[in-house]
Amino acid sequence: MFSRRILLQAATLAAFAASPALAEDPFKIGFVYVGPVGDHGWTYQHDQGRLALEEHFGDKVETTYVENVSEGPDAERVIRQLASSGNDLIFTTSFGFMNATDKVARQFPQVKFEHATGYKQRDNVANYLTTTYQGRYISGFLAGKLSKSGKVGYIASFPIPEVVRDINAVQLGLQSVRDDAELVIIWVNSWYDPAKEGDAARVMINQGVDFIIQHTDSPAAMQVAEEKGIWAVGQASDMSRFGPDAHVTAVIDDWAPYYIKRTQEAMDGTWKPHDHWGGMQDGMLKLSPINEKVSADVAAEALGIASSIADDSFHPFTGPIANQAGEIVIPEGERMSHEQLAGMNWYVEGVKGELPQ
Amino acid sequence: MNIELLVTVIGAATPLLLAALGELVTEKSGVLNLGVEGMMIVGAITGFAVTLTSGSATLGIIAASASGVFMALVFGVLTLTLLANQVATGLALTIFGTGLSSLIGAGFVGMPVPRLPVLPVPGLSELPVLGPLLFRHNALVYLSLIATLAVSWFLWRSRAGMILRAVGENDTSAHSIGYHVIRVRYLAVMFGGAMAGLAGAFLSLAVTPMWVEGMTAGRGWIALAIVVFASWRPMRVLAGAYLFGGMSILQLHAQGAGGINIPSQVFTMLPYIATILVLTIISAGPWRGRLDSPACLGKPFRAAG
């Protein structure tokens, strides 16, 4: 009698204790952003992914984000804070967070980390990025078709593999249309400094550039392009509001499907570290609608390249590709390997100037 | 020389000049307000928001400087009335301003406003070379240049300016001969806020007419550096602002044009190196004491008795 009652009580207690815990303990996900969510570019798109994640899972997840985290000692502090405050999965969304992510991951083996655009992997650190070079190649193609002066501007942030790869992709796309075009590259040493990005745009327009591609995060260059009546390609998200006439297209990152998939895997216990390169093939990279002012032929050709990249019948980095010295690095017909692309630190033939180290 | 390039330099230098002139007056009264960046960014969003909602850039500019004054008053109450540490309060003001501007600006992301109109000076703007260089700008560019002369005149030629400098050099003496140290400092701090607000509005209405978070991107700190670089003299502030602004444009130009092979990072750090050099000279070199660093800079004042 006595023991049965205790057993019953214990069972009730256990049920009581367990059920609300299941319902009230959401899976916690942290995000670390390099810029503000209001940058209308790179960080904005990541935050859109986070919001889609919340919408998809509802009460089952709880997300936190920290914005404006500088790429240095601050990052490590922020990531550690997120890890120690009970987050199960943490996305760190800028190249410069790589070492900090790696370091904190070592101390928190039970927490899973996802680092965007980097290459350091561990049992609990995965890498992911979008192959923006696909979009850059098409930007280069469009520049070749639309530029009258033959001078195409590239506003660059930092000389890391991602940026170098994209500069090369633009050059290859440009060369596929015409040989006489020149790429004018200006480094602003920042991901996000609207006034400086705008100044860089003004300066290159002053030097004869009439088509701008940017690898920085604010729409400042787009706005200047609109004023000066030239073309520009938007970065990371659709920037046509800032340059309705100038905006050729934008290369858009869509992180939502990836964030949802990886969260599901982490919740199910099937999460594994990997190095995922999303792109046009899986919908993580898209082109925004091409400006109506672009001739239908050119627009159709650009979309054709996009679909041949998506179905893998074409790869932007297909040989022959030579370096600046004219030595063939990738022989005719071969594709550049994942490793070669990941660590790219040299310019292809045709890019002028020296790569800052 | 390329005129359009020089016009771009003016665009880069004007916000630095406006903010640095305000900070110069603040520091001359003996108050160190490190919150320039914070006041500037609040001015940027306020100017933008008011211009967008009211449709009037004039109202936007007035509101921007008013918001700068509000921020400065927060600083004033804390440091002048409550005697909080000026350095810590200034830093906190920057952090507060960054957060406040993001909060106000959340609803304004991604909306464009028309660029601040250019007001050509009749007649003069038709001059070759000089016309586009000096007489075809928006109101804030003219204002920044007039303000430089006005501040210079005020500090060295007017009685009120003399009192302000006296308060900054020796607050106890100024107090004992009957000047209201705290009142003078409040006014100077408010002027600094108003100018920082204008500098912010220049960024969000003229340089890049839009609101994005953190758009001042450290220009408030460069303005602070310029005040030291200029050794607390308005004309040197003008030179410093144009030198630093010019340098930032020139390095972009040099990269695009090719030929000059200096790493662009060097230019990015140049303003700070120049400032450290000047600071070193001021505090150790043979010119010590001949520069105009206010003696009471950063020291709290409590009226005796």
Image: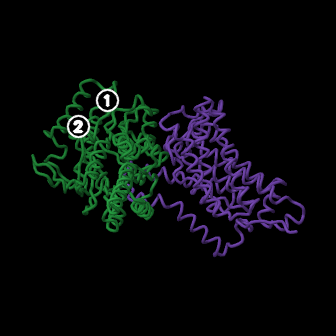
Q: What secondary structure is marked by label 1?
A: loop
Q: Is residue B115 visible?
A: yes
* Mark 1 closeness class: few <14, some 14–19, many ≥20 residues within 10 Å: some
Q: Where residue A4 appears, x then y in whole percent?
A: 32, 60
Q: Where residue A163 appears, x then y in whole percent?
A: 31, 51
Q: Residue at x 52, y 43 (%)?
A: B8
Q: Report the chain shown in purple.
A: B
Of all chains, the one bearing label 1 is A
**Color used for chain A?**
green
Residue A178 bears which disc, if any?
A: 2
| Horizontal relation, residue B76 to residue A357: left or right | right
Q: Where residue B138 appears, x then y in whole percent?
A: 61, 36
Mark 2 vs mark 1: same chain? yes
The mark closer to the camera, 2 or 1, is 1
Residue B18 bears which disc, if any?
A: none
Task: Looking at the picture, tell me which residue is in the foreground, B165 or B43.
Answer: B43
The residue indicated by pointer 1 is A290
What's under tag 1, amino acid-wise? Ile
Location of residue B239 by image quarter: bottom right
Question: Where's the N terminus of chain A, which quadrant?
Answer: bottom left
Vertical placement of residue B247 versus B116, above or below = below
Q: Residue furthest right?
A: B177
What's under tag 2, amino acid-wise? Arg
| Horizontal relation, residue B288 to residue B271: left or right | right
Question: Where's the C terminus of chain A, which quadrant?
Answer: bottom left
Task: Looking at the picture, tell me which residue is in the foreground, A64 or B7.
Answer: A64
Q: Earlier in the sequence, mark 2 or mark 1?
A: 2
